[in-house]
Amino acid sequence: MILALAAALAIVVQDHTPLRSAARSSATELTTLWQGDVLEIRGERAGYLQVYNYRRERGGYLRSDAVRSLALTPADAPELLAVVRFLRETRGSEALGISYGAAYLKAVPSQALTAEPLAAIAHMAERLADAASGSSNAADIGAHLDVVAQFGIRMRSFERNGHMQVCYDGELFQRVLAMPQASAEERAQAALSLTRPECIDPTLSPAAHVALDQERAAVLDGIAEAELTPLTRMRLHARRAAVWSVRAFEQARQGATPIAAAQRAMAELLSIHTGELGEDRRSEYTDAAVRVSASRWAASAPVVHLDGFSLSAAAAEPGQTCISLRLNAAPAAALVRRCTYGIAWLASAQLVGASQAIVLAVQPLESWRELWVFHRRAGAWVVDVLPPGTGDPEVGYIDYAGYAAGTHRLLIALEVKEHGHFRRSFEELRLDDLVSIRQASFPQLLRDFGRWQDLGWRRDTLALR
C-alpha cells in the first residue's frame, strides 16, 4: 500500500547525497541520503536546503541541486505522471520512480486514477527486487529497498539454490487485476508478474504449494488474449504451459488423472511462436519447454509392454511408491526393487535392445525428471539413477533417446538449468556402468544418434525443437 505523502516536500534525486550539520560543504556529514528519499523542506540558505527526513528522524542541510521540490495539487499530477513514465523503464532509478509514483498518487483525484501508475510502480518494485537478487552492489540496492519501504512497498526474500531471491509481494499487481478500467495488456503484465515460478517460496508446504498453483492457473486463464501484443500473448502461453505442467505433476501425486493438465501444458507450449518472443524473452520459452518436458509422460496412459518382463508399482510408506521388476516366467520373486517419493511414469517404461536393460522416467519434483536404468551388473539386476544434472535440483529432465546395439551404448538427451543458465546435451553412455563416452550440443554431431535413435523419442521429445 502506498503511504500518503505530506506537503512541502522534496525528493532526493542523487545517490550518496550527504546530509550535513550546517549549510556548508565542510560541515559534518550526519548521514547519507539516497535517490527517492523524501524530505520536508524547512528553509533555505546559501544554496543549501534545511530539511527533515522522517524515515531517519533527522534534520540537516543538503545542496539544493540534489533534490527536486514537489507540489501535490491535482494540477501537478500530469507532470508527476510524466516523470513516472520516464523513470519506469530507466534501470537503476527504481527508488526515484517509486517515490515520484507515490507523489502522483497523492496528487491525483481519486476519480481520475487509472491502472497505469499502479502498474508502473509495481514494475519498478519488481525490477528493484530482481536487482537485489544476487546483486554485487548490495549496499546501494539495500539502501534503495529501505527507501521504497517507506511507501509500503514490501519485499519477500528466501534462499534458492545457494543464492538470495528477493521478490516484490505484488500488492499493486493485485490491484491492477481488480480494476475494471485496466487494459488487457496491463492485466496480462500483472498476471505474468504474479505467477513467476522463481518467486514461489521453496519452504511452502505441499498443500500450500498446490493451492498457490491452482490460483496461478486461475489468474492466467482469466486473461483475455484478443487485445494483447504478440509478445505478451506468447509470454502468456509460455507461463500457462509451465503452470499446467506443474498442475499435471500435482494431480498425479494426489492420485487424480493428470492427462488433461499435461495435454493443456503441451497445447500452450505449441501455441508459442518463438520469433515473436525475441532474443530477450527466449529464455521464457526454454524454461516452459523444459518444465513441460519434465511432466510430458503425464499425458500418456500407463500401458506397459515389456516382452518377458513386467514392472509394477506398489505403495509403501506414506507418499512412497516402490517399483519392482519381474520376469513374467517367474513373477513371484522380484529381480530388483527400488522406491521413490516421486512419480514413476510407467507409460515411459521401455525395453532396451535384446532385453539388455529397461528404462523408466521418474519425476521426484515438479520440474525435475530422472531416468532409472534397470540393467545387469556382474550377473545381477541393479537400478541406477541418471539425473539431468549434478547440482541441486532446479529445472531439468533426461530422456532415453535410443540404444546403439553394436557398441552397447545408451543414448540420452537432457536439458537442465544450472546457475541460471540452460544447458542441452546429447550423450552416449556405456551401458555396463553408465559412464559418458561422448557428448555434444547437437545430436547430428554424434554418429550413433543418426543410426540408432529411438523413433518414439524422436516423435515425442521437445529436445529437438
Image (cartoon, helix red, strand yellow):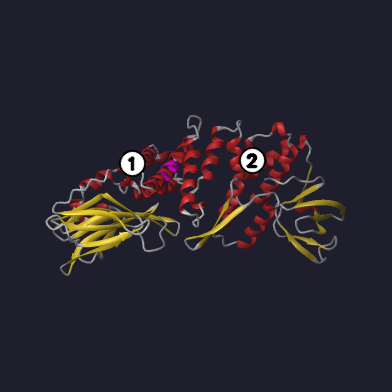
Relative horizontal placement of residue 408, taking residue 39 as reference (left or right): left
Q: Earlier in the sequence, mark 2 or mark 1?
A: 2
Q: Residue at x 26, y 57 (%)?
A: 323
Residue holding disc 2: 118
Q: Nearer the viewer, residue 313 or 232?
A: 313
Q: Position of residue 108 (x, y in %)?
A: 73, 36
Q: Secondary structure at mark 1?
A: helix
Which quadrant is the N terminus positioned in?
top right
Tell me if label 2 and label 1 are in contact, CB under 8 Å: no
Q: Please tell me how crowded label 1 is: few (under 14), some (14-19), or many (20+) other residues with Cα within 10 Å.
A: some
Residue 77, compared with residue 319, is above or below; it is above
Residue 457 is covered by the magenta coloring: no
For the question of whether residue 87 can be seen, the reply is yes
Residue under label 1: 259
Tell me the element at label 2.
Answer: helix
Report the span colored magenta. 238-242
Residue occupying the point 40% across, 41% down? 274
